Structures are given as C-alpha cells and as structure tokens.
Image (tube, rainbow, N blue to C red):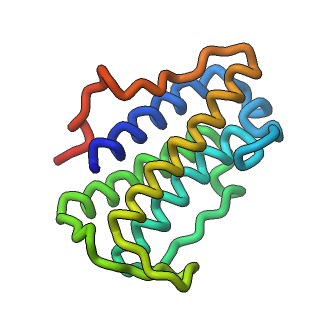
Amino acid sequence: MIKFFEYNWQVRDEWFDWCEQLSADELLKERTGGVGCILNTLFHIIDVEYSWLRGIQGKEDIVFDFAEYNTLSKVKALSDQLRKEIMQFFNTGIGVSRLVQVPWDKNHYSVEDILHHIIAHEIHHIGQLSVWARELGMVPVSAHFIGRKFNEYRN
C-alpha cells in the first residue's frame, strides 16, 4: 500500500512544481468545486492525510490553519515536514486489520480502510486540480501510475 502513498506524494510534488508558473492570485482564486482554490486544495490534502494517520496512531489531531500556510512555499514545506514523520510511522510497521477510532468520528474503522480512504481522497482532489488546470488552458500533471519510479521516500 505504501506504493500508492509514494505515488500520491510524487504527483503532489509535481503539482507543487506545476503551481510555480501561477501567480499567488491565481493559486488563491476561488473556483467551483474542490476546496475552493488550488492552494487550499493542496493544503487540505496534506491536512487530511496527516490527521487520519495521527488518528491511526492514537495521537491527538493537530489542526493546521490555512491562513498560516497561504503561500505555495509554506504549503510545500508543510508537506515535506509531515511526510518525514509519516514515513517514520510507515517504517515501524502497521497492523492494517486492527480497528481504530479517531477523535472526530464515533465509528471504528480498520487501519486498512483508513489508508485506502487517504489514498482515494488525494486522488479525488488531484482530479479536481486537473480540471482547474484545463480550465486555465494548461496541461495538468500526469496521473499515470505506470512508468513511475518508487522507493524514493523509503529509508
């Protein structure tokens, strides 16, 4: 399953690079769908991933405020910082069949289902970014899985 996280991280990093060609106004412009704007959508992906993974570990949720991460460089730095912590967690091994409860939901979920949810959530929002790229008359980041090289995030 880590390969899909690596895929999402690669694609996310490519979106960060893609965003370099846009002005700050364009990154923050309200759009239809998604979380409202390109930058907040990237921030939301990172925030949700981190919250669920902390929930799996039984750790308190850390709520990030988009107002504090309202530039591309700040959102990318947050992604890089949290990814290091996430990889430490993945490197310790995960009991995917165990059930967990996260603070914001009364239901119990298997770790495996949560991991699948995190992966699907990012892919969903990356699709939204692709639509917005086309609306801007630009070529979106490739979503192809085949042909990518993995293991760059593993220790």
How many marks do you count on the picture?
Answer: 0
Percent position (x, y) of residue 87? 28, 55
Q: Residue furthest bottom?
A: 106
| Residue 83 point in image, percent of width and height | 37, 52
In terms of depth relative to the viewer, which is nearer, 69 or 1? 1
Q: Is residue 24 left or right of residue 144?
A: right
Residue 144 falls in which quadrant of the image?
Answer: top left
Indicate whether 148 appears above or below 69: above
Q: Residue at x 40, y 40 (%)?
A: 9
- Residue 148 versus residue 120 in the image, above or below: above
Q: Position of residue 4 (x, y in %)?
A: 34, 43
- At x 48%, y 37%, the residue is 12
Residue 24, quarter of picture = top right
Residue 95 placed where, x, y %?
Answer: 22, 70
Which residue appears at 46% of the width and 67% of the height? 52
Q: Please name the residue shown 56% across and 37% down the image.
A: 126
In depth, the one of 40 and 98 nearer the eye is: 98
Does 55 appear above or below 148? below
